[in-house]
């Protein structure tokens, strides 16, 4: 089930999946987010763009949330935090970014999971719920994703979720301060999806 809401100026989708809830980040998420990101820094660094010096500061988070709200309002991106439905604990995040309309109707999907929650199936459930939202609610035709060839966990996640590898992009994204090659994946709205777990 997916619905849009506006509470206290924050606006965005709330998406429910199996034992997981995703929603647009809010200022009140700062402490939990900063703690999880700090705790997971060494785990995440090889797979992400270089973190700015002030990345975990409250001021940077406030700027980030303002940008997120604007991107959702303008249908440019849908950044989402993933929470355990039973405990409310922050697990990670999924973003549908670079939303393109017109003749393409597509977006790029990125995701991260905190180290304490890795290899528990949370991100698989989050991605599946977000794909339902992308195709049913946003009416997108195509969701793209890219991952480093060495990121076996990400490759498993994408393939388990029904993505098809479409190519190999040389020096595609600057990850951890280095322009790195990526595997390119995509899913179309009418591609077969694995059965819900």
Image: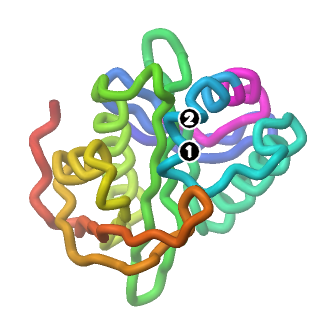
Q: Nearer the viewer, residue 10 or 91?
A: 91
* Residue furthest right in the image: 59
Give the residue displayed 71% in from the left and 29% down from the top.
Answer: 34
Please tell me whether residue 126 is drawn above or below residue 35 in the rendered image. Answer: below
User: Where does the magenta region start and end?
Assistant: 22-34
Q: Quadrant of residue 135?
A: bottom left
The residue where tag 2 is placed is: 42
Above or below: residue 74 compared with residue 57: below
The crowding category of the residue bearing disc 1, from other C-alpha atoms within 10 Å (few below 14, some 14 to 19, many at least 20), is some
Which residue reaches farthest top?
Answer: 87
88 left or right of 143? right
Alpha-carbon distance for marks 2 and 1? 5 Å
Residue at 89% of width from left, 41% of height from top?
59
Question: Residue 140's quadrant in the figure?
Answer: bottom left
Say which residue label 1 marks.
45
Helix, strand or loop for the magenta stretch, by majority: helix
Q: Is residue 62 left or right of residue 157?
A: right
- Whole-percent x and y of residue 99? 51, 71
Q: Secondary structure at mark 2?
A: helix
Q: Quadrant of the N terminus?
A: top left
């Amino acid at each position: 089930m997916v619905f849009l809401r506006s509470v206290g100026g924050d606006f965005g989708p709330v998406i429910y999946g199996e034992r997981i809830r995703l929603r647009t980040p809010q200022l009140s998420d700062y402490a939990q987010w900063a703690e999880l990101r700090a705790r997971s820094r060494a785990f995440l660094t090889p797979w992400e763009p270089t973190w700015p010096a002030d990345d975990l500061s409250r001021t940077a988070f406030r700027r980030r949330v303002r940008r997120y709200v604007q991107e959702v309002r303008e249908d440019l991106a849908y950044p989402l935090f993933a929470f355990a439905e039973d405990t409310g604990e922050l697990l990670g995040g999924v973003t549908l970014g670079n939303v393109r309309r017109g003749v393409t109707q597509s977006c790029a999907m990125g995701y991260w999971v905190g180290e304490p929650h890795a290899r528990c199936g949370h991100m698989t459930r989050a991605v599946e719920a977000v794909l339902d939202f992308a195709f049913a609610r946003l009416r997108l035709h195509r969701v793209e994703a890219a991952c480093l060839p060495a990121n076996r966990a990400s490759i498993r996640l994408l393939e388990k979720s029904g993505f098809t590898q479409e190519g190999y992009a040389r020096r595609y994204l600057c990850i951890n301060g280095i322009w790195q090659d990526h595997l390119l994946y995509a899913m179309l709205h009418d591609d077969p999806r694995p059965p819900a777990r």
